[in-house]
Image: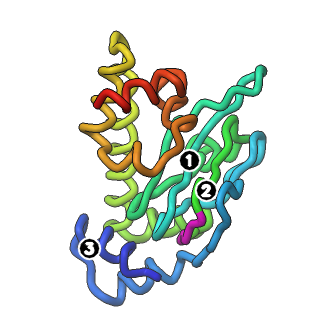
Amino acid sequence: MYELLKKYISSRTQINDKEMDFICSNFKPLKTKRNEILVRYEEICQQYYFVNKGCIRLFTINKEGTETSRFFAFEGGFGTALPSFIDQQPAFEYLQTIEKSELLAISRTDFYQLVETMPQFALIYREILELGFITAQKRIYGFQGFDALEKVKWIITHQPHFLLRVSNKMAASYLGISPSTLSRIKSKL
């Protein structure tokens, strides 16, 4: 259950077996159903998740009931409702598994204890934040001025597995296009 997490950590920092075991002991296995909500709107996020199997999605719902997907974490990735996790204010988004998933969950208290006491884990946290920021910036700025075809080509180039794993409705909301437009473009590629 911890092999993928260990591989993730050891690929990013030098760490001995005792330190690795200590980090892993702070993560608790969590099996979820498809479409299970991990964090609800206005709930304060208390967990950070590592995806062993499956996928989690961060999304919002506007006043008209339209969902907008903002982030996906697949196998080997971390995900949470980060603003709420950090500042302990209610989340303005939902965190959900979109597939039957196997996650490793770490509490906020344990997470920050590792960040404060283990330089290797602090480095990993910084890398997670930096990668998340860069990905978000590329998506935001890259999509400005892109037409629908360019957005789909961008996602195929930068996240090739994305369109194979995510429903057209969720993918379209992430790309900022309609599901019918996405279907039309995919049929031409």
Q: Residue 183 location, x and y as percent?
A: 46, 30
Element marked by disc 2: strand
Give the labeled residue for mark 2: 97
Q: Decide which of 98, 28 is in the foreground and name it.
A: 98
**Horizontal side, residue 145 vs residue 39: left or right:** left
Element marked by disc 3: helix
Between the residue at mark 2 and the residue at mark 3, the CA separation in whole angstroms equals: 26 Å
The residue at 37%/31% (across/down) is: 187
Q: Quadrant of the C terminus?
A: top left
Give the labeled residue for mark 3: 10
Q: Residues within 10 Å of mark 2 (few under 14, many from 20)?
A: many
Q: Residue 166 location, x and y as percent?
A: 49, 46
**Horizontal side, residue 81 vs residue 181: left or right:** right
The residue at 30%/45% (across/down) is: 160
- The amino acid marked with disc number 2 is Thr
- The amino acid marked with disc number 1 is Arg
The answer to whether marks 3 and 1 mark residues whose Cβ atoms lie closer than 8 Å is: no
The answer to whether marks 2 and 1 mark residues whose Cβ atoms lie closer than 8 Å is: yes
- The boundaries of the magenta stretch are 100-104
Disc nearer the start of the sequence (3/1): 3
Q: Which mark is residue 57?
A: 1
